[in-house]
Amino acid sequence: MLRNAIAAALVILVPIAAECSGVLHPIEDQLTATRMAIHRRPPTGQVAVIDIDAKSIAAMGSWPWPRSVYAQLIDKLVGLRAAAIAMDVDFSAPSSPADDTALESALKRAGGTVVLASFTQKLTGAIDAAPAYNQPLERFGENAWVASVNVRPDPDGQVRSLGYGLIIDGHVVPSMPTVLAGGLGEAGQAYSIDFSIDERLIDRIPLIDVLQGGIDPSRIAGKKVIVGAQAIELRDFFDVPVAGEISGPLLEATATETLLQGRALRGTSLAVGLAGLILIALAAFAIGRVRWALALAGLVVAGAVIEATALVVQVAFAVVVNTVPWHLALATFAILVLVSEIDFRQLLQTMWRVRASNAEALLAKVVADNFAGVVVVDENGMIRAASRSASELLGRRTDLVGSKARSVLPPELMSAVESVLAVVGFERGLRRPRVVSLRRGDGELRAIEYVTTVSELESEPTDSGNGQSSHYFACLTFTDVTEQRAAQAKIAYMARFDSLTQLPNRNQIIERLEEVFTSAETKVRASAVVCFDLDGFKNINDTLGHHVGDLLLQDIAAQATNLVPEGAIVARLGGDEFAALISGEKAAADAVAFASRIVGAAGKLRHLDGRHVTISTSAGVALADSRDRGPDDILKRADVALYRAKANGGNGVVVFDRAMLEEMVERQRFEFDLVRAFDCRQFEIWYQPQIDLRTNRPAGVEALLRWRHPVRGMISPGEFIPVAETIGLIDELGQWVLEVACAEVVSWGVPIRLAVNVSSAQFAQRDMAEVVSRVLARTGMPASQLDIEITESLFMRPAKIVERALAGLRAMGVGIALDDFGTGYSSLSYIKKFPITKIKLDQSFVSGLPENAGSASIVRAVAGLAKDLRLYLNAEGVENAAQVAFLGSLGVHEVQGYLFGLPQPASEIIQLLSQSADVVQLRA
């Protein structure tokens, strides 16, 4: 009876002591993972992962990406009707203003469907400091949800749980899976992830496929999309149960699926565990002395029943039953049964043999299945275990086990193995990886990374009790890192070189400039920067195609490399802009000379892809100044000089002086005032009458934009319209003019034609036919009373876009007037190809009439052309009666100018129109 009581007590106390010590936790975790692996369940299909993978990085051609790429991605996903967009990307630091603005705008357009990542991290070098909280920039956070993406692995390195959220300065920051799953759980608490959810079935899409539009929309529509890094070189991977190593976004997707399916794993209470131990102890007390074989069989059956029940409970109810203490209790019971039957020394030997056999079988299995190349060599130089990957990496077709290591391993690896076996009794080995280049049996040269370690294995205890002997084994672990090294080299190259021209990029020239500004002042004074770009490069891309544009950039890069002084560096900053850093005692003269040479060389005729290409170049030169605070200052000054060169007409060189910077500041102020002018309603529309020479009555009016500046007064359109086109305001401004002018003319109640100037930039940014159609519908303006005035610069745009827009306008009945005729190319092919209805003769040909014979001949020729082509002809700038008489004699239909009225506000022009008793009837 006492013996049974002791057995029952040990059955309870041994598992409790082991559980309290923590030694059972790894086994508990492994059992839970095994149950997950036995029964895998599918995901809900509500979650998809957009991978920033190697394919996407290679397609984009650079890393890191500008934030405009993420802005495009958000717009694409919103267009595909994603239910939510979680960006596992760090947006906590500012980038370029343009890229940040693009991302902010995309977030606004997404309408609150985007979740941005935040995280806490320890400050480098800080001792006992609170973790720093990194969150998206405020401008981003205002237009999106913010969620934490912190992951805290267990002590063994595996991730088994995630938090519902963090509490930062009293504020709750939910985790990203919590936000995507609907906000379940309490911040500060964690939940166990159910890795029985098969992460292989979660839809994963390369990011580049989304940007290029090559996916089925049903893969995105209505789903919660997680965007994050999957490329190996980005190192965003975690070790998890069942699946092994997975990417951060896939981990978040699995955690989200856990919450969506209500599968957050729960453990059983201590009372359940203790009750199970008591039941086993009662069984141990009650069984008494029975045959040991029968007792062991019963214990095995009991263990199987316990584990099967735990599996069912975990699968069905997401409850993890901690069965390890119960198994340990059963094992303790079994040991007690065996001890009572077997001599202790004999038991030790039996246990050792079983343990050695199991360990050897397990070692052989683990080694054979290892992803890496593994070779275990004994003291005699024989291979005792080897992975299948080792045979493949070494170019061998047969199993390596049982072979002599020297006959199999290359000399470099054999030397490493022998070195760790040279001194027995000490733990020695090459712990830090090394890389060697090996030529395999197929002749291919590969980069192999390897590590060697030494292990001691005790032999079986002797019957005499004189102790145990030891044996030593060397373990060689190696992997093929050829592709990894190549990818790392490519990424490193892309970070410092331009992929198109192979020139250094902005990063590299910034590094060189930083070296200049951290050196002696004499070296600073002996340095200069040349910025140069191609005049009208966009037209090359638009008319000849981007392929020709790329060839042109490569050609210019090659010329610049040949022309730059020795020791200088030429870099491509982006687009068609280049920069050169020139140092030396004659840096100033060399920089100007180089700028002049590149401008001259770039202007020569080129033959690219079967096309004849000519283009001019502008260059700006800035000399290093002790007042410069760093690379940005001198690059900015060179860019200011480049801007002045382009403002001077291009194809020239300008050296920076301080006055240019002041002008640049003034221009920026002007641009700022222009943007504010639109918001503050400082623009006005004035109208100039157009007189029909056949009736001498007003036939129409031309809408002219005016800017009433609060300080500078009235500003000419010739001064602010080019700036509006440059800063991208012209589209919004032009549409406003069109809508207000149409509304005002309709309100007059007078059947008069309206002419409105439309910039060529508006055609590039909008479908003008659709824009005009909407304006006519809103204002009630008849299409037959509207003339859209264009200039020849429009025909530099892609022909198909222009042709489609003009055809759409004419189909509605809107007239097309070609303004400033005679001052541009005046190509008759434009009139023949496009549906022009009116020609407006430029005032420069009218001002000299009728005395100037040359002007008279030109006007006479244009009038004849208009008559033959049945085009309506308007003459601008008419100032006296003699001009009217001459133009009328040539059959000019319509005139406008100061003789008939200056541009006037709407209130005054309506009075002029109402004074005419009979307003001319409009032509069809």
Image (tube, rainbow, N blue to C red):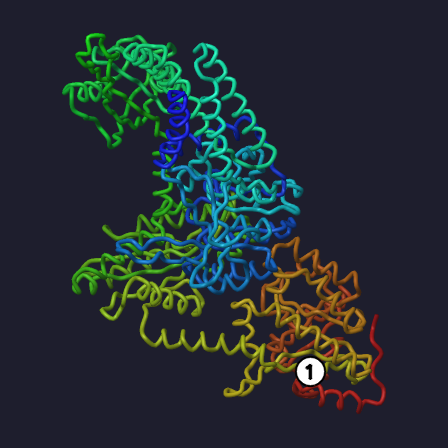
Is there any visible trace of residue 420 in the rendered image? yes
Q: Nearer the viewer, residue 798 or 672?
A: 672
Q: Position of residue 71 (x, y in %)?
A: 53, 55
Q: Residue at x 63, y 44 (%)?
A: 220
Asked if 120 appears above or below 413 in the picture, the reply is below
Residue to which mark 1 is pinned: 687
What kind of residue is marked 1?
Tyr
Is there any visible trace of residue 209 in the rendered image? no
> Which image quarter is the N terminus in?
top left
Q: Position of residue 651 (x, y in %)?
A: 41, 62
Name the residue at the front extreme.
Answer: 1
Q: Position of residue 884 (x, y in %)?
A: 71, 84
Asked which quadrant contains residue 855, the reply is bottom right
Name the residue at the left extreme.
Answer: 423
Asked if 490 appears above or below 859 in the picture, the reply is above
Q: Position of residue 795 (x, y in %)?
A: 62, 60
Left or right, residue 194 beside residue 448 = right
Q: Secondary structure at mark 1?
A: strand
Q: Residue at x 62, y 40 (%)?
A: 215
> Which image quarter is the C terminus in?
bottom right
